[in-house]
Image (tube, helix red, strand yellow):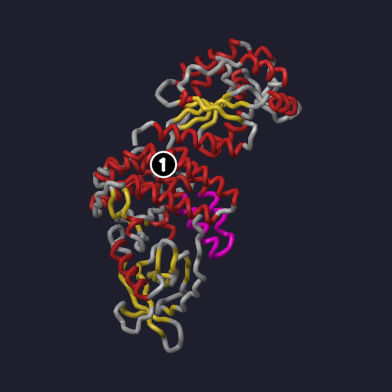
Amino acid sequence: MTTLRLPPRPPRPDLHLDRPGDVEVRETHISWVFLAGDRAFKVKKPIRLPYLDYRTPAQRLAMCRAEVELNRRLAPEIYIGVRGLVPRREGGLALAAAGDREAVDFAVEMRRFDDADTLDSRLRAGTAGAVELARLGRRLADFHARARAEPASDGAERVKRALDDTFATLHGQLAPPGRRLIGARERMAGGILAAAWDELDRRGAGGRIREGHGDLRLEHVILGELGPAVVDCVEFDPGLRSIDVAGDLAFLVMDLHRIGRGELAPVLVAAYREAGGDPGSDALLALLAAYRAYVRAKVALTRTAQHGPAGREGAAQLLGLGARMLWQALTPLTLVVAGVAATGKSTLAAALAAESGFDLVSTDVLRKRLAGLAPTTRAPRSLYDDEHDRATYAALGDEAAAAGRGVVVDGTFRRAADRSAFFARRGGDTPLVLVECRAPASVLLARADARTHAASRVSDADAAVVAGQLLAFEPVDELAAADHVLLRSDRPVADLVSEVGEALARRAGASPAR
Protein backbone atom coordinates (compact mmCIF):
# COMPACT_ATOMS: atom_id res chain seq x y z
CA MET A 1 0.00 0.00 0.00
CA THR A 2 1.47 3.35 -1.06
CA THR A 3 1.14 6.20 1.45
CA LEU A 4 1.53 9.77 0.26
CA ARG A 5 3.91 11.63 2.57
CA LEU A 6 3.81 15.40 2.20
CA PRO A 7 6.61 17.78 3.14
CA PRO A 8 6.00 20.58 5.64
CA ARG A 9 4.17 23.47 4.04
CA PRO A 10 6.84 26.05 3.07
CA PRO A 11 6.41 29.71 4.00
CA ARG A 12 5.35 31.98 1.17
CA PRO A 13 8.17 34.24 -0.08
CA ASP A 14 7.87 37.95 0.59
CA LEU A 15 8.04 39.14 -3.02
CA HIS A 16 8.13 42.89 -3.69
CA LEU A 17 6.95 43.88 -7.18
CA ASP A 18 7.45 47.30 -8.69
CA ARG A 19 4.00 47.24 -10.28
CA PRO A 20 0.97 49.53 -10.03
CA GLY A 21 -1.89 48.51 -7.80
CA ASP A 22 -2.22 45.78 -5.25
CA VAL A 23 -0.49 42.45 -5.59
CA GLU A 24 -2.83 39.46 -5.48
CA VAL A 25 -1.40 36.10 -4.45
CA ARG A 26 -2.84 32.75 -5.45
CA GLU A 27 -1.63 29.36 -4.33
CA THR A 28 -1.69 25.87 -5.83
CA HIS A 29 -0.29 22.74 -4.22
CA ILE A 30 3.08 23.32 -5.98
CA SER A 31 3.34 27.08 -6.70
CA TRP A 32 2.54 30.63 -5.67
CA VAL A 33 1.36 33.07 -8.34
CA PHE A 34 1.78 36.83 -7.76
CA LEU A 35 -0.57 38.96 -9.88
CA ALA A 36 0.38 42.61 -10.40
CA GLY A 37 -0.86 44.90 -13.12
CA ASP A 38 -0.61 43.20 -16.50
CA ARG A 39 1.92 40.62 -15.28
CA ALA A 40 1.89 37.35 -13.37
CA PHE A 41 4.93 35.80 -11.66
CA LYS A 42 4.86 32.12 -10.77
CA VAL A 43 7.23 30.95 -8.01
CA LYS A 44 7.65 27.24 -7.42
CA LYS A 45 7.46 25.88 -3.88
CA PRO A 46 10.66 24.29 -2.49
CA ILE A 47 9.02 20.89 -2.03
CA ARG A 48 9.33 17.30 -3.11
CA LEU A 49 6.31 15.15 -4.00
CA PRO A 50 6.15 11.65 -5.49
CA TYR A 51 5.95 13.18 -8.95
CA LEU A 52 8.22 16.29 -8.70
CA ASP A 53 11.29 17.67 -6.95
CA TYR A 54 11.61 21.47 -6.50
CA ARG A 55 13.82 21.44 -3.40
CA THR A 56 16.90 23.36 -4.65
CA PRO A 57 17.14 26.74 -6.44
CA ALA A 58 18.93 25.02 -9.35
CA GLN A 59 16.06 22.59 -9.75
CA ARG A 60 13.53 25.42 -9.65
CA LEU A 61 15.49 27.43 -12.25
CA ALA A 62 15.62 24.45 -14.59
CA MET A 63 11.88 23.89 -14.22
CA CYS A 64 11.11 27.58 -14.78
CA ARG A 65 13.08 27.51 -18.03
CA ALA A 66 11.39 24.28 -19.10
CA GLU A 67 7.97 25.77 -18.31
CA VAL A 68 8.56 28.78 -20.54
CA GLU A 69 9.98 26.76 -23.43
CA LEU A 70 7.24 24.13 -23.38
CA ASN A 71 4.34 26.54 -22.93
CA ARG A 72 5.41 28.79 -25.77
CA ARG A 73 4.24 25.97 -28.08
CA LEU A 74 0.57 26.69 -27.29
CA ALA A 75 0.75 30.15 -25.68
CA PRO A 76 3.70 32.11 -27.12
CA GLU A 77 2.03 35.46 -26.46
CA ILE A 78 1.58 34.73 -22.74
CA TYR A 79 4.97 33.33 -21.63
CA ILE A 80 7.59 36.11 -21.45
CA GLY A 81 10.58 34.49 -19.74
CA VAL A 82 12.32 33.66 -16.46
CA ARG A 83 13.22 36.22 -13.77
CA GLY A 84 15.60 35.93 -10.87
CA LEU A 85 14.61 36.83 -7.30
CA VAL A 86 17.26 38.63 -5.27
CA PRO A 87 17.29 39.65 -1.58
CA ARG A 88 16.37 43.25 -0.73
CA ARG A 89 18.17 45.21 2.00
CA GLU A 90 14.78 46.05 3.48
CA GLY A 91 13.84 42.37 3.52
CA GLY A 92 11.99 40.15 1.09
CA LEU A 93 12.81 39.47 -2.55
CA ALA A 94 12.82 41.64 -5.66
CA LEU A 95 12.80 40.84 -9.37
CA ALA A 96 16.08 40.67 -11.29
CA ALA A 97 17.51 39.05 -14.41
CA ALA A 98 17.47 35.25 -14.43
CA GLY A 99 21.27 35.22 -14.60
CA ASP A 100 21.82 37.58 -11.66
CA ARG A 101 24.46 36.00 -9.40
CA GLU A 102 22.62 37.17 -6.31
CA ALA A 103 19.43 35.35 -7.31
CA VAL A 104 18.26 32.95 -4.61
CA ASP A 105 15.09 31.90 -6.37
CA PHE A 106 13.30 32.26 -9.70
CA ALA A 107 9.92 33.04 -11.22
CA VAL A 108 8.19 32.53 -14.55
CA GLU A 109 7.03 35.89 -15.93
CA MET A 110 3.76 35.82 -17.86
CA ARG A 111 1.31 38.26 -19.36
CA ARG A 112 -1.69 38.27 -17.10
CA PHE A 113 -4.99 37.03 -18.49
CA ASP A 114 -8.50 37.50 -17.19
CA ASP A 115 -9.95 34.45 -15.46
CA ALA A 116 -13.23 35.29 -17.16
CA ASP A 117 -11.56 34.45 -20.49
CA THR A 118 -10.75 30.86 -19.61
CA LEU A 119 -12.81 28.25 -21.39
CA ASP A 120 -13.98 26.97 -18.02
CA SER A 121 -15.40 30.39 -17.06
CA ARG A 122 -16.87 31.05 -20.49
CA LEU A 123 -18.65 27.69 -20.62
CA ARG A 124 -20.09 28.21 -17.14
CA ALA A 125 -21.23 31.72 -18.12
CA GLY A 126 -22.83 30.49 -21.33
CA THR A 127 -20.60 32.66 -23.54
CA ALA A 128 -18.77 29.75 -25.20
CA GLY A 129 -19.99 26.55 -26.78
CA ALA A 130 -19.63 24.33 -29.82
CA VAL A 131 -17.79 26.93 -31.94
CA GLU A 132 -15.03 27.39 -29.36
CA LEU A 133 -14.73 23.64 -28.71
CA ALA A 134 -14.41 22.91 -32.43
CA ARG A 135 -11.73 25.60 -32.77
CA LEU A 136 -9.85 24.11 -29.83
CA GLY A 137 -10.08 20.63 -31.32
CA ARG A 138 -8.47 21.83 -34.54
CA ARG A 139 -5.74 23.70 -32.64
CA LEU A 140 -4.86 20.61 -30.63
CA ALA A 141 -4.77 18.39 -33.71
CA ASP A 142 -2.21 20.75 -35.25
CA PHE A 143 -0.26 20.91 -31.96
CA HIS A 144 -0.07 17.13 -31.68
CA ALA A 145 0.90 16.77 -35.35
CA ARG A 146 3.89 19.08 -34.74
CA ALA A 147 4.86 17.58 -31.36
CA ARG A 148 7.86 15.30 -31.07
CA ALA A 149 6.85 11.66 -31.55
CA GLU A 150 8.14 8.86 -29.34
CA PRO A 151 7.35 5.55 -31.06
CA ALA A 152 7.04 2.81 -28.45
CA SER A 153 5.98 -0.80 -28.37
CA ASP A 154 4.65 -0.59 -24.80
CA GLY A 155 1.73 1.82 -25.22
CA ALA A 156 -0.61 -0.33 -23.13
CA GLU A 157 1.97 -1.00 -20.43
CA ARG A 158 2.51 2.74 -20.04
CA VAL A 159 -1.19 3.28 -19.41
CA LYS A 160 -1.27 0.34 -17.01
CA ARG A 161 1.64 1.77 -15.00
CA ALA A 162 -0.06 5.16 -14.82
CA LEU A 163 -3.34 3.59 -13.66
CA ASP A 164 -1.56 1.36 -11.14
CA ASP A 165 0.37 4.28 -9.66
CA THR A 166 -2.74 6.45 -9.39
CA PHE A 167 -4.87 3.75 -7.77
CA ALA A 168 -2.02 2.87 -5.38
CA THR A 169 -1.83 6.50 -4.26
CA LEU A 170 -5.61 6.69 -3.83
CA HIS A 171 -5.55 3.55 -1.70
CA GLY A 172 -3.07 5.29 0.59
CA GLN A 173 -5.13 8.49 0.77
CA LEU A 174 -8.58 7.03 1.42
CA ALA A 175 -10.18 5.58 4.55
CA PRO A 176 -11.07 1.84 4.52
CA PRO A 177 -14.60 2.22 3.01
CA GLY A 178 -13.15 4.34 0.22
CA ARG A 179 -10.37 1.83 -0.36
CA ARG A 180 -12.91 -0.94 -0.85
CA LEU A 181 -14.79 1.12 -3.41
CA ILE A 182 -11.69 2.29 -5.27
CA GLY A 183 -10.46 -1.31 -5.35
CA ALA A 184 -13.62 -2.30 -7.22
CA ARG A 185 -13.15 0.58 -9.67
CA GLU A 186 -9.51 -0.44 -10.16
CA ARG A 187 -10.60 -3.93 -11.14
CA MET A 188 -13.19 -2.43 -13.46
CA ALA A 189 -10.53 -0.26 -15.10
CA GLY A 190 -8.32 -3.33 -15.51
CA GLY A 191 -10.96 -5.15 -17.53
CA ILE A 192 -11.53 -2.14 -19.75
CA LEU A 193 -7.79 -1.72 -20.23
CA ALA A 194 -7.55 -5.36 -21.33
CA ALA A 195 -10.11 -4.60 -24.04
CA ALA A 196 -8.06 -1.59 -25.20
CA TRP A 197 -4.66 -3.30 -24.91
CA ASP A 198 -4.03 -4.06 -28.58
CA GLU A 199 -5.32 -0.65 -29.65
CA LEU A 200 -2.90 1.10 -27.29
CA ASP A 201 0.05 -0.97 -28.47
CA ARG A 202 -0.79 -0.25 -32.12
CA ARG A 203 -1.04 3.46 -31.34
CA GLY A 204 2.29 3.44 -29.52
CA ALA A 205 4.06 1.72 -32.41
CA GLY A 206 2.34 4.07 -34.87
CA GLY A 207 3.69 7.28 -33.32
CA ARG A 208 0.62 8.36 -31.36
CA ILE A 209 2.76 8.89 -28.23
CA ARG A 210 3.96 12.49 -28.46
CA GLU A 211 5.31 15.25 -26.26
CA GLY A 212 1.98 16.88 -25.57
CA HIS A 213 0.66 19.13 -22.82
CA GLY A 214 -0.11 16.75 -19.96
CA ASP A 215 -2.59 18.97 -18.06
CA LEU A 216 -5.23 20.04 -20.58
CA ARG A 217 -7.87 21.48 -18.27
CA LEU A 218 -10.62 23.86 -19.33
CA GLU A 219 -9.23 26.45 -16.91
CA HIS A 220 -5.90 26.33 -18.79
CA VAL A 221 -7.50 27.21 -22.15
CA ILE A 222 -7.57 30.98 -22.76
CA LEU A 223 -9.92 32.31 -25.42
CA GLY A 224 -8.83 35.33 -27.43
CA GLU A 225 -8.88 36.98 -30.83
CA LEU A 226 -6.03 34.86 -32.18
CA GLY A 227 -7.70 31.61 -31.19
CA PRO A 228 -7.35 29.50 -28.05
CA ALA A 229 -4.07 29.55 -26.12
CA VAL A 230 -3.27 26.84 -23.59
CA VAL A 231 -1.13 27.46 -20.50
CA ASP A 232 0.37 25.40 -17.64
CA CYS A 233 1.88 22.49 -19.52
CA VAL A 234 3.44 19.85 -17.24
CA GLU A 235 7.14 20.73 -17.10
CA PHE A 236 8.35 18.71 -14.10
CA ASP A 237 8.04 15.20 -15.54
CA PRO A 238 8.47 14.40 -19.27
CA GLY A 239 6.64 11.13 -18.69
CA LEU A 240 3.45 13.00 -17.79
CA ARG A 241 3.39 14.94 -21.05
CA SER A 242 4.93 12.38 -23.43
CA ILE A 243 1.79 10.32 -23.70
CA ASP A 244 -0.70 9.01 -26.21
CA VAL A 245 -2.38 12.06 -27.75
CA ALA A 246 -5.72 10.51 -26.74
CA GLY A 247 -4.61 10.95 -23.13
CA ASP A 248 -4.16 14.68 -23.69
CA LEU A 249 -7.56 15.02 -25.32
CA ALA A 250 -9.21 12.85 -22.65
CA PHE A 251 -8.43 15.44 -19.97
CA LEU A 252 -10.69 17.93 -21.74
CA VAL A 253 -13.34 15.25 -22.29
CA MET A 254 -13.31 14.55 -18.55
CA ASP A 255 -13.39 18.23 -17.67
CA LEU A 256 -16.41 18.88 -19.89
CA HIS A 257 -18.30 16.16 -18.06
CA ARG A 258 -17.08 17.55 -14.73
CA ILE A 259 -18.77 20.91 -15.29
CA GLY A 260 -21.93 19.37 -16.74
CA ARG A 261 -21.16 20.10 -20.40
CA GLY A 262 -20.49 16.56 -21.55
CA GLU A 263 -22.61 17.09 -24.65
CA LEU A 264 -19.76 19.22 -26.05
CA ALA A 265 -17.17 16.43 -25.80
CA PRO A 266 -18.22 14.86 -29.14
CA VAL A 267 -17.86 18.31 -30.77
CA LEU A 268 -14.28 18.59 -29.53
CA VAL A 269 -13.39 15.04 -30.58
CA ALA A 270 -15.03 15.32 -34.00
CA ALA A 271 -13.19 18.57 -34.79
CA TYR A 272 -9.91 17.02 -33.65
CA ARG A 273 -10.49 14.03 -35.92
CA GLU A 274 -11.59 16.13 -38.90
CA ALA A 275 -8.38 18.19 -38.58
CA GLY A 276 -6.29 15.05 -38.96
CA GLY A 277 -5.93 14.01 -35.31
CA ASP A 278 -6.37 10.41 -34.19
CA PRO A 279 -8.25 10.36 -30.84
CA GLY A 280 -8.71 6.58 -30.76
CA SER A 281 -11.91 4.72 -30.02
CA ASP A 282 -14.68 6.11 -27.83
CA ALA A 283 -13.98 3.38 -25.26
CA LEU A 284 -10.29 4.32 -25.09
CA LEU A 285 -11.08 8.01 -24.66
CA ALA A 286 -13.53 7.21 -21.85
CA LEU A 287 -10.98 5.00 -20.06
CA LEU A 288 -8.34 7.73 -20.28
CA ALA A 289 -10.90 10.33 -19.13
CA ALA A 290 -11.56 8.13 -16.08
CA TYR A 291 -7.82 8.06 -15.41
CA ARG A 292 -7.70 11.86 -15.61
CA ALA A 293 -10.57 12.15 -13.12
CA TYR A 294 -8.75 9.87 -10.69
CA VAL A 295 -5.53 11.88 -11.08
CA ARG A 296 -7.41 15.06 -10.22
CA ALA A 297 -9.01 13.31 -7.25
CA LYS A 298 -5.51 12.37 -6.08
CA VAL A 299 -4.39 15.99 -6.36
CA ALA A 300 -7.51 17.20 -4.54
CA LEU A 301 -6.76 14.82 -1.69
CA THR A 302 -3.16 16.08 -1.64
CA ARG A 303 -4.48 19.62 -1.23
CA THR A 304 -6.75 18.41 1.54
CA ALA A 305 -3.75 16.96 3.37
CA GLN A 306 -1.88 20.26 2.96
CA HIS A 307 -4.66 22.78 3.64
CA GLY A 308 -7.46 20.97 5.47
CA PRO A 309 -10.80 19.36 4.49
CA ALA A 310 -11.92 21.97 1.94
CA GLY A 311 -10.92 19.80 -1.03
CA ARG A 312 -12.46 16.53 0.17
CA GLU A 313 -15.89 17.24 -1.34
CA GLY A 314 -14.29 17.99 -4.68
CA ALA A 315 -12.28 14.77 -4.45
CA ALA A 316 -15.48 12.78 -3.84
CA GLN A 317 -17.07 14.32 -6.92
CA LEU A 318 -14.01 13.47 -9.00
CA LEU A 319 -14.00 9.89 -7.75
CA GLY A 320 -17.64 9.62 -8.82
CA LEU A 321 -16.78 11.13 -12.19
CA GLY A 322 -14.01 8.58 -12.65
CA ALA A 323 -16.51 5.78 -12.11
CA ARG A 324 -18.96 7.37 -14.56
CA MET A 325 -16.25 7.59 -17.22
CA LEU A 326 -15.44 3.90 -16.71
CA TRP A 327 -19.08 3.08 -17.35
CA GLN A 328 -18.97 5.25 -20.48
CA ALA A 329 -16.11 3.08 -21.72
CA LEU A 330 -18.55 0.14 -21.76
CA THR A 331 -21.02 1.85 -24.08
CA PRO A 332 -22.94 1.41 -26.28
CA LEU A 333 -24.80 -0.90 -23.90
CA THR A 334 -28.32 -1.90 -22.94
CA LEU A 335 -28.19 -3.18 -19.37
CA VAL A 336 -31.31 -5.10 -18.37
CA VAL A 337 -31.86 -5.60 -14.62
CA ALA A 338 -34.33 -8.46 -14.29
CA GLY A 339 -35.77 -10.78 -11.64
CA VAL A 340 -39.00 -11.44 -9.82
CA ALA A 341 -40.58 -8.67 -7.80
CA ALA A 342 -38.92 -7.75 -4.47
CA THR A 343 -35.44 -8.93 -5.52
CA GLY A 344 -34.30 -5.30 -5.27
CA LYS A 345 -33.92 -4.99 -9.04
CA SER A 346 -35.50 -1.53 -9.17
CA THR A 347 -33.24 -0.26 -6.38
CA LEU A 348 -30.22 -1.73 -8.16
CA ALA A 349 -31.30 -0.35 -11.54
CA ALA A 350 -31.65 3.16 -10.07
CA ALA A 351 -28.23 2.90 -8.40
CA LEU A 352 -26.60 1.68 -11.62
CA ALA A 353 -28.15 4.55 -13.58
CA ALA A 354 -27.03 7.06 -10.96
CA GLU A 355 -23.40 5.91 -10.98
CA SER A 356 -23.09 5.33 -14.73
CA GLY A 357 -25.07 8.32 -15.97
CA PHE A 358 -27.09 5.94 -18.16
CA ASP A 359 -30.74 6.59 -18.95
CA LEU A 360 -33.23 4.58 -16.87
CA VAL A 361 -36.48 3.05 -18.16
CA SER A 362 -38.83 0.91 -16.08
CA THR A 363 -41.77 -1.40 -16.76
CA ASP A 364 -43.52 -0.31 -13.55
CA VAL A 365 -43.51 3.35 -14.58
CA LEU A 366 -44.13 2.71 -18.28
CA ARG A 367 -47.05 0.30 -17.74
CA LYS A 368 -48.93 2.87 -15.69
CA ARG A 369 -48.04 5.74 -18.00
CA LEU A 370 -49.51 3.81 -20.95
CA ALA A 371 -52.70 3.41 -18.91
CA GLY A 372 -52.79 7.08 -17.90
CA LEU A 373 -51.96 6.37 -14.24
CA ALA A 374 -49.50 8.04 -11.87
CA PRO A 375 -46.51 5.86 -10.85
CA THR A 376 -47.72 5.44 -7.25
CA THR A 377 -51.37 4.70 -8.17
CA ARG A 378 -52.36 1.10 -7.53
CA ALA A 379 -53.19 -0.49 -10.91
CA PRO A 380 -55.97 -3.05 -11.46
CA ARG A 381 -55.00 -6.69 -11.97
CA SER A 382 -56.22 -6.49 -15.56
CA LEU A 383 -53.26 -4.23 -16.37
CA TYR A 384 -50.98 -7.24 -15.84
CA ASP A 385 -52.57 -9.67 -18.30
CA ASP A 386 -50.69 -11.12 -21.28
CA GLU A 387 -51.87 -8.44 -23.70
CA HIS A 388 -50.73 -5.55 -21.47
CA ASP A 389 -47.46 -7.35 -20.73
CA ARG A 390 -46.61 -7.66 -24.43
CA ALA A 391 -47.54 -4.01 -25.07
CA THR A 392 -45.50 -2.84 -22.08
CA TYR A 393 -42.37 -4.74 -23.07
CA ALA A 394 -42.66 -3.69 -26.72
CA ALA A 395 -42.92 -0.03 -25.62
CA LEU A 396 -40.00 -0.61 -23.27
CA GLY A 397 -37.97 -1.76 -26.27
CA ASP A 398 -38.88 1.46 -28.09
CA GLU A 399 -37.72 3.54 -25.11
CA ALA A 400 -34.45 1.63 -24.84
CA ALA A 401 -33.82 2.11 -28.56
CA ALA A 402 -34.43 5.85 -28.24
CA ALA A 403 -32.17 6.26 -25.20
CA GLY A 404 -28.55 7.38 -25.23
CA ARG A 405 -25.46 5.23 -25.65
CA GLY A 406 -26.10 3.65 -22.27
CA VAL A 407 -29.48 2.63 -20.84
CA VAL A 408 -30.54 0.66 -17.74
CA VAL A 409 -33.81 -1.24 -18.18
CA ASP A 410 -35.79 -2.26 -15.08
CA GLY A 411 -38.35 -5.07 -15.36
CA THR A 412 -39.04 -8.64 -14.26
CA PHE A 413 -38.50 -10.07 -17.78
CA ARG A 414 -39.84 -13.25 -16.22
CA ARG A 415 -41.35 -14.72 -19.41
CA ALA A 416 -39.65 -15.51 -22.69
CA ALA A 417 -42.50 -13.87 -24.62
CA ASP A 418 -41.94 -10.58 -22.73
CA ARG A 419 -38.24 -10.72 -23.45
CA SER A 420 -38.91 -11.48 -27.11
CA ALA A 421 -41.23 -8.47 -27.42
CA PHE A 422 -38.55 -6.24 -25.89
CA PHE A 423 -35.69 -7.64 -28.00
CA ALA A 424 -37.67 -7.24 -31.24
CA ARG A 425 -38.39 -3.55 -30.65
CA ARG A 426 -35.10 -2.35 -29.17
CA GLY A 427 -33.09 -3.34 -32.26
CA GLY A 428 -29.97 -5.46 -32.41
CA ASP A 429 -27.08 -3.04 -32.93
CA THR A 430 -26.42 -2.19 -29.29
CA PRO A 431 -24.89 -4.93 -27.11
CA LEU A 432 -27.21 -6.20 -24.37
CA VAL A 433 -26.41 -7.73 -20.99
CA LEU A 434 -29.12 -9.08 -18.68
CA VAL A 435 -28.44 -9.05 -14.94
CA GLU A 436 -30.77 -11.49 -13.20
CA CYS A 437 -31.32 -10.69 -9.52
CA ARG A 438 -32.01 -13.59 -7.17
CA ALA A 439 -32.63 -13.84 -3.42
CA PRO A 440 -34.07 -16.42 -1.01
CA ALA A 441 -37.86 -16.76 -1.15
CA SER A 442 -38.16 -15.81 2.52
CA VAL A 443 -36.37 -12.52 1.87
CA LEU A 444 -38.55 -11.73 -1.15
CA LEU A 445 -41.83 -12.43 0.64
CA ALA A 446 -40.80 -10.34 3.64
CA ARG A 447 -39.82 -7.42 1.39
CA ALA A 448 -43.06 -7.61 -0.59
CA ASP A 449 -45.14 -7.66 2.57
CA ALA A 450 -43.27 -4.69 4.07
CA ARG A 451 -43.62 -2.43 1.02
CA THR A 452 -47.34 -3.13 0.55
CA HIS A 453 -48.02 -0.39 3.10
CA ALA A 454 -45.53 2.16 1.68
CA ALA A 455 -47.28 5.16 0.12
CA SER A 456 -44.34 5.87 -2.21
CA ARG A 457 -44.25 2.39 -3.74
CA VAL A 458 -44.40 2.07 -7.52
CA SER A 459 -44.57 -1.72 -7.84
CA ASP A 460 -47.98 -3.31 -7.29
CA ALA A 461 -46.51 -6.74 -6.48
CA ASP A 462 -47.55 -8.06 -3.04
CA ALA A 463 -46.43 -11.30 -1.41
CA ALA A 464 -48.94 -13.36 -3.40
CA VAL A 465 -47.67 -11.92 -6.69
CA VAL A 466 -44.07 -12.62 -5.69
CA ALA A 467 -44.92 -16.21 -4.83
CA GLY A 468 -46.58 -16.66 -8.21
CA GLN A 469 -43.63 -15.15 -10.09
CA LEU A 470 -41.19 -17.45 -8.31
CA LEU A 471 -43.10 -20.46 -9.63
CA ALA A 472 -43.59 -19.07 -13.14
CA PHE A 473 -40.19 -17.46 -13.92
CA GLU A 474 -39.00 -18.87 -17.25
CA PRO A 475 -35.23 -19.48 -17.52
CA VAL A 476 -33.22 -17.01 -19.61
CA ASP A 477 -31.96 -19.43 -22.25
CA GLU A 478 -31.93 -17.11 -25.25
CA LEU A 479 -28.75 -15.21 -24.32
CA ALA A 480 -25.12 -16.27 -24.44
CA ALA A 481 -23.56 -17.04 -21.06
CA ALA A 482 -21.37 -13.90 -21.23
CA ASP A 483 -24.49 -11.76 -21.67
CA HIS A 484 -26.35 -13.21 -18.67
CA VAL A 485 -25.10 -12.23 -15.20
CA LEU A 486 -26.57 -13.98 -12.13
CA LEU A 487 -26.55 -11.83 -9.00
CA ARG A 488 -27.38 -12.66 -5.39
CA SER A 489 -29.20 -9.42 -4.59
CA ASP A 490 -29.86 -9.59 -0.83
CA ARG A 491 -26.67 -7.60 -0.20
CA PRO A 492 -25.77 -3.90 0.04
CA VAL A 493 -26.62 -2.15 -3.20
CA ALA A 494 -23.17 -0.51 -3.43
CA ASP A 495 -21.60 -3.97 -3.50
CA LEU A 496 -24.03 -5.05 -6.22
CA VAL A 497 -23.21 -2.01 -8.37
CA SER A 498 -19.51 -2.80 -8.05
CA GLU A 499 -20.07 -6.45 -8.91
CA VAL A 500 -22.05 -5.59 -12.05
CA GLY A 501 -19.42 -3.09 -13.17
CA GLU A 502 -16.62 -5.59 -12.69
CA ALA A 503 -18.55 -8.31 -14.54
CA LEU A 504 -19.15 -6.02 -17.51
CA ALA A 505 -15.49 -4.94 -17.56
CA ARG A 506 -14.35 -8.59 -17.50
CA ARG A 507 -16.74 -9.28 -20.36
CA ALA A 508 -15.23 -6.39 -22.35
CA GLY A 509 -11.68 -7.47 -21.54
CA ALA A 510 -12.27 -11.07 -22.57
CA SER A 511 -13.43 -10.19 -26.08
CA PRO A 512 -10.16 -9.09 -27.78
CA ALA A 513 -7.03 -11.21 -27.97
CA ARG A 514 -4.18 -9.90 -25.79
Asked if 103 appears above or below 81 in the picture, the reply is below
Quick check: is 315 in the magenta stretch? yes
The residue located at (45%, 42%) in the rendering is 189
Image coordinates for residue 203, horizontal then vertical, percent: 28, 43
Q: For the residue carrying disc 1, how many other residues have a C-alpha within 10 Å: few (<14), some (14-19), or many (20+)?
A: many
Identify the residue position indicated by label 1 in the image: 286
Q: Horizontal placement of 288 versus 442: left or right? A: left
Q: Is residue 151 left or right of residue 295?
A: left
Q: Which residues are magenta?
A: 294-318
The answer to whether residue 94 is magenta is no
Residue drawn at x 71%, y 21% is 462
- Is residue 409 visible in the rendered image? The answer is no
Where's residue 240, x and y in %? 36, 56
* Three-letter code for the amino acid on which mark 1 is drawn: Ala
Q: Residue furthest bottom?
A: 89
Q: Is residue 194 left or right of residue 307?
A: left
